[in-house]
């Protein structure tokens, strides 16, 4: 069992519950997502909070499975994926580094086609280290995102 002190809270790994996204957690999910993304890329979200909620509830969930990591009903992580791609992966700032991201990633790998791709922003070196540590290799670079930031495409293949 992993124990870590996160923002004054003691967290045990077995207190983390992974569930399929339900709209009851929409506000918490978007708040966490926006805060993490802003910190990771140093840029404010371009969309309004309401537009972000709409995107989560009506666009992202139509195209991807979305799972949440919860601790005591608090959203501490989210991942959006299908069998070939991870579209979003964010872990609450106060709960990074305790295995939540790895837990979500491992679940997606197990359900994948044996190959996954994803993009991360070039400025997000922490994400790059995370993905590389978990077997993803860089396969490309580009700028095709609404933030107009260079990004990196990664790929993972089951061995």
Image (tube, rainbow, N blue to C red):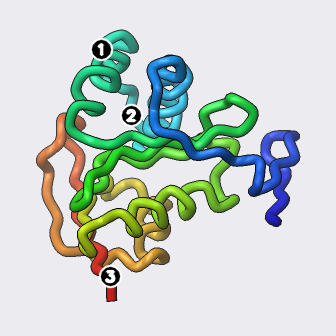
Q: Is residue 152 visible?
A: no
Residue position for label 2: 43
> Disc 3 and disc 1: Cα gap in Å?
36 Å
Residue position for label 1: 51
Q: Is residue 11 above or below residue 130?
A: above
Q: Which label's residue is closer to the chain start, 3 or 1? A: 1
> Disc 2 and disc 3: Cα gap in Å?
34 Å
Residue 70: which numbered mark, if any?
none
Residue appearing at x 64%, y 52% in the figure: 96
Q: Residue furthest top?
A: 50
Q: Which label's residue is closer to the chain start, 2 or 3? A: 2
Judge left or right: residue 81 versus residue 79. left
Q: Position of residue 111 (x, y in %)?
A: 36, 63
Q: Position of residue 41 (x, y in %)?
A: 40, 44
Q: In terms of depth relative to the viewer, which is nearer, 97 or 142?
A: 97
Q: How many marks?
A: 3
Residue appearing at x 30%, y 14% in the figure: 51
Mark 3 neighbour density, 10 Å: few (under 14) some (14–19) many (20 or more): few
Residue position for label 3: 158
């Amino acid at each position: 069992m992993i124990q870590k002190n996160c923002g004054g809270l003691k967290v045990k790994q077995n207190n983390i519950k992974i569930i399929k996204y339900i709209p009851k957690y929409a506000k918490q999910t978007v708040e966490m997502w926006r805060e993490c993304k802003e910190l990771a890329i140093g840029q404010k979200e371009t969309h309004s909070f309401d537009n972000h909620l709409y995107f989560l509830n009506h666009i992202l969930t139509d195209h991807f499975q979305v799972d949440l990591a919860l601790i005591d009903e608090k959203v501490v992580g989210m991942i959006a994926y299908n069998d070939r791609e991870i579209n979003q992966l964010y872990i609450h700032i106060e709960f990074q580094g305790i295995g939540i991201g790895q837990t979500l990633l491992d679940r997606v790998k197990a359900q994948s086609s044996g190959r996954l791709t994803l993009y991360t922003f070039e400025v997000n070196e922490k994400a790059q280290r995370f993905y590389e540590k978990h077997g993803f290799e860089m396969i490309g670079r580009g700028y095709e995102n609404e933030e107009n930031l260079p990004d990196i495409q990664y790929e993972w293949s089951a061995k």
